[in-house]
Amino acid sequence: MKIITKPLIVVIINSLIIAQIRTGPAPVKIAYLGTQITGFEEWISKELSDKMSSIFADINQDQLINSNAFLSNTNLDSFFVNIEDYNLFNDIAVQTDAEYIFAGKINNASPGSDRLMIQGTFYKYNKNSKTITRHDILKYYNQIDSEIEKIKSDQLNSIPNINKPTSLSKASLFFGVALLVGILLFTFGTAGLDAEATGNNAGSNPTDN
């Protein structure tokens, strides 16, 4: 009984894990082409670039396609010049097999030297619906963090299955497997003890005192 029980448990667990993997949603592939930033000092441009990139910091990195892998600097500059062209987004989506393409373009619109004003647009292209969604930006520099959170909420987190943490999924799966193992071991262990007790009782003969 013990020899049969262990392989049976392993087969059941493996079947459940494979079923979970196969039936789960496929990871959504996206490409971020960066944000073109003009009219600011170099350190401000670097800080803004990092802030815009942080929009994608929480997604699994294997879902994020690096633009450097398929676009040279020359082609990227040409893209930003013609960023309103729908066909450019579509060509990149086909080339990279990305379901969504993101890019931004912002500039310095400060009315004076006392406060920095950021103006621009963040773009999201959906390959399936073949549509471009634009998020217009007009904020002072000290307000840009809240605007980035809004972009992240409206344009990224609104995508189904885009932000499913791997660690949480694995933890749930392993917890379920551990629970299943415990139940099966308990069930078969109890059944084995009952069978052993029954066998012992059946094999013992009454004795006269």
Image (tube, rainbow, N blue to C red):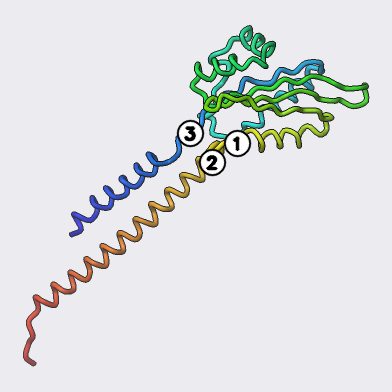
Residue under label 1, please give it. Answer: 58
Farthest-out residue, top: 74
Q: Image point 66% across, 31% down: which residue? A: 54
Q: Are marks 1 and 3 in contact (CB under 8 Å)?
A: no
Would you call the spot at circle 2 few (<14 residues within 10 Å), some (14-19), or many (20 or more)? few
- Split into 4 quadrants, where in the image is the N terminus? bottom left
Residue under label 2, please give it. Answer: 165
* Secondary structure category for the residue under label 3: loop
Q: Nearer the viewer, residue 106 or 183?
A: 106
* Dot in front, 1 or 3: 3
Q: Are marks 2 and 3 in contact (CB under 8 Å)?
A: no
Say whether disc 1 or disc 2 marks the residue closer to the N-terminus. 1
Q: Nearer the viewer, residue 17 or 208?
A: 17
Q: Amino acid at mark 2?
A: Pro
Q: Quarter-wise, where is residue 193 in the image?
A: bottom left
Q: Position of residue 102 (x, y in %)?
A: 62, 24
Farthest-out residue, bottom: 209
Q: Position of residue 32 (x, y in %)?
A: 60, 23
Query: Rounded to the nearest whole Å, what is the CA distance between mark 2 and mark 3?
Result: 11 Å
Q: Quarter-wise, where is residue 157 in the image?
A: top right
Q: Are marks 1 and 2 in contact (CB under 8 Å)?
A: yes
Q: Position of residue 8 (x, y in %)?
A: 24, 52
Q: Image point 7% across, 87% down: which residue? A: 207
* Above or below, 87 relative to 12: above
Q: Image point 57% across, 15% down: which residue? A: 68
* Secondary structure category for the residue under label 1: loop
Q: Image point 54% across, 34% down: which residue? A: 60
Residue under label 3, please give it. Answer: 27
Say whether disc 2 or disc 3 marks the residue closer to the N-terminus. 3
Query: Rounded to the nearest whole Å, what is the CA distance between mark 1 and mark 2?
Result: 8 Å
Would you call the spot at circle 3 few (<14 residues within 10 Å), some (14-19), or many (20 or more)? some
Q: Amino acid at mark 3?
A: Pro
